[in-house]
Image: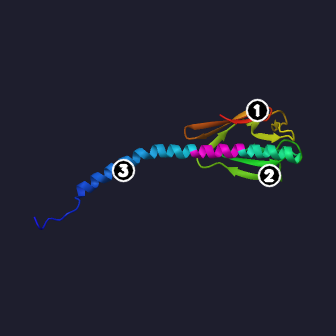
């Protein structure tokens, strides 16, 4: 047996590749779910931070600031309402924020604009009191951002 070659046969190598492929396939599902949950949490936390920032600016600068949810359902705009008409007009935009990949939001069409008064009270696009739930989605995961009539913001 002095001439025997040591190593793996082609069959043994293919069996190992199949086993590793099956294990990788099993791991991809939960990994993708975790990535989607992380993106959803990132989007919701950024949105709530922007809401709070616009509210803070309205109170401290004695002006009206707001957020408009665009029809794409993946982008929103922060703005200063200089003419106090409760809408985002030309020249009032501060920033445009895109949500992370595969995350979107939904809100009733009547409540796509949130403007904060100098007292921290939210108003809608017709300058009436604002109260709504905005739902963020990533795959099958959802989170709601609830904005109350008196300006309380919470995540559910």
Side of 22 relative to 11 (left or right): right
Task: Say whether residue 155 is magenta.
Answer: no
Q: Residue furthest toward the left?
A: 1
Q: Could you tell me which residue is drawn at 73 percent across and 52 percent down?
A: 96
Give the mark nearest the N terminus, 2 or 1: 2
Please identify the residue farthest to the bottom as the structure is shown: 3
Neighbour tally class for label 1: few under 14, some 14-19, many 20 plus, Cα within 10 Å? some
What's the residue at 76%, 35% (across, down)? 152
* Mark seen at residue 21: 3
Q: Is 44 inside the magenta-drawn segment?
A: yes
Q: CA distance from mark 2 to mark 1?
A: 24 Å
Spatial separation of the CA atoms under disc 1 and disc 3: 50 Å
Check disc 2 and report the residue beneath it. 93
Image coordinates of residue 147 in percent, x first then y, are 74, 35
What's the magenta region? 38-48
> Depth check: 109 or 145 in front?
145
Residue 117 falls in which quadrant of the image?
A: top right
User: Which quadrant, please, contains the C terminus?
Assistant: top right
Measuring 14% from the left and 65% from the top, which residue is drawn there?
4
The answer to whether the residues at label 2 and label 1 have Cβ atoms under 8 Å apart is: no
């Amino acid at each position: 047996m002095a001439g025997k070659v040591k190593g793996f046969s082609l069959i043994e190598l293919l069996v190992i590749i199949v086993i590793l492929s099956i294990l990788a396939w099993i791991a991809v599902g939960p990994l993708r779910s975790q990535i989607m949950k992380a993106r959803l949490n990132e989007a919701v936390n950024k949105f709530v931070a922007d809401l709070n920032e616009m509210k803070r600016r309205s109170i401290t600068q004695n002006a009206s600031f707001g957020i408009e949810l665009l029809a794409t359902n993946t982008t929103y705009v922060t703005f200063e309402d200089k003419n106090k008409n409760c809408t985002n007009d030309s020249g009032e935009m501060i920033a445009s924020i895109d949500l992370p990949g595969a995350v979107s939001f939904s809100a009733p069409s009547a409540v796509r604009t949130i403007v904060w008064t100098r007292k921290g009270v939210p108003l809608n696009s017709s300058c009436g009191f604002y109260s709504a739930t905005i739902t963020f989605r990533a795959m099958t995961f959802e989170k709601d951002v609830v904005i109350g009539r008196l300006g309380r913001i919470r995540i559910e």
